[in-house]
């Protein structure tokens, strides 16, 4: 029973991310730039530390955009 609740929570989170990507222009832009930056990391000599900073920054931007979308949906 507990595993089902955890799986439902993840499914709801994934649905929220998909909703945001489909409906928010800025999220599409963030996602596109993220893919370009990550692909460029493969071609340039990016150290592990620099990649970690990039990953944390990208994650923070995506999280704030999701938070912004949820606030807009509520209001």
Image: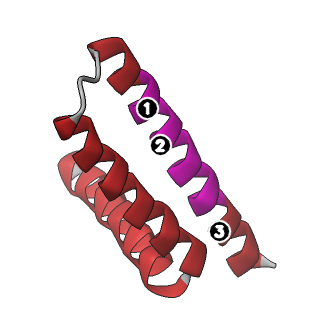
In the rendered image, residue 51, in percent from the top left (x then y), is placed at 34, 25
Query: Would you say 72 lies left or right of 13 here?
Result: right
Q: Is residue 37 above or below residue 43?
A: below
Residue at left offset 61%, top offset 59%: 65
Q: Which residue is mark 1?
A: 54
Kindly report the secondary structure that dominates the magenta region of the rendered protein. helix
Span highlighted in magenta in the image: 53-67
Question: 48 or 64, which lies in front?
Answer: 48
Residue at 28% x, 50% y is: 6
Up the image or down, 9 lies above or below 50; here it is: below
Q: Earlier in the sequence, mark 3 or mark 2?
A: 2
CA separation in Å, label 3 and label 1: 24 Å
Distance Cα–Cα, label 1 vs label 2: 6 Å
The number of callouts visible is 3
Q: Which mark is residue 75?
A: none
In the image shown, does 15 or 51 lie closer to the viewer? Answer: 51
Which quadrant of the structure image shows residue 8? bottom left
Asked if the residue at tag 1 contacts the one at tag 3, i.e. Cβ–Cβ closer than 8 Å, the answer is no
* Of the two numbered discs 3 and 2 in the rendering, the one whose residue sits closer to the viewer: 2
Q: Evaluate if marks 1 and 2 touch, with contact meaning CB atoms under 8 Å apart.
A: yes
> Residue 72 lies in magenta, yes or no?
no
Disc 1 residue crowd, few under 14, some 14–19, many 20+, Cα 10 Å = some
59 in the magenta segment: yes
Looking at the image, which residue is at 28% across and 16% down? 47
Q: Residue at x 46, y 74 (%)?
A: 28
Residue tagged 2: 58
**Secondary-structure class at tag 2:** helix
Per the model, the C-alpha gap separating discs 3 and 2 is 18 Å
| Along the line of sight, the residue nearer the viewer: 6 or 1 | 6
Q: Which residue is mark 3?
A: 70
The image shows residue 60 at horizontal and vertical percentages of: 55, 40
Question: Mark 3 against mark 1, which lies toward the viewer?
Answer: 1
């Amino acid at each position: 029973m507990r595993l089902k609740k955890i799986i439902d929570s993840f499914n709801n989170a994934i649905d929220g991310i998909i909703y945001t990507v489909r409906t928010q222009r800025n999220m599409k832009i963030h996602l596109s730039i993220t893919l370009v930056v990550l692909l460029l990391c493969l071609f340039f000599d990016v150290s592990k530390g620099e990649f970690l900073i990039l990953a944390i920054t990208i994650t923070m931007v995506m999280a704030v955009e999701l938070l912004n979308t949820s606030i807009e949906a509520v209001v």
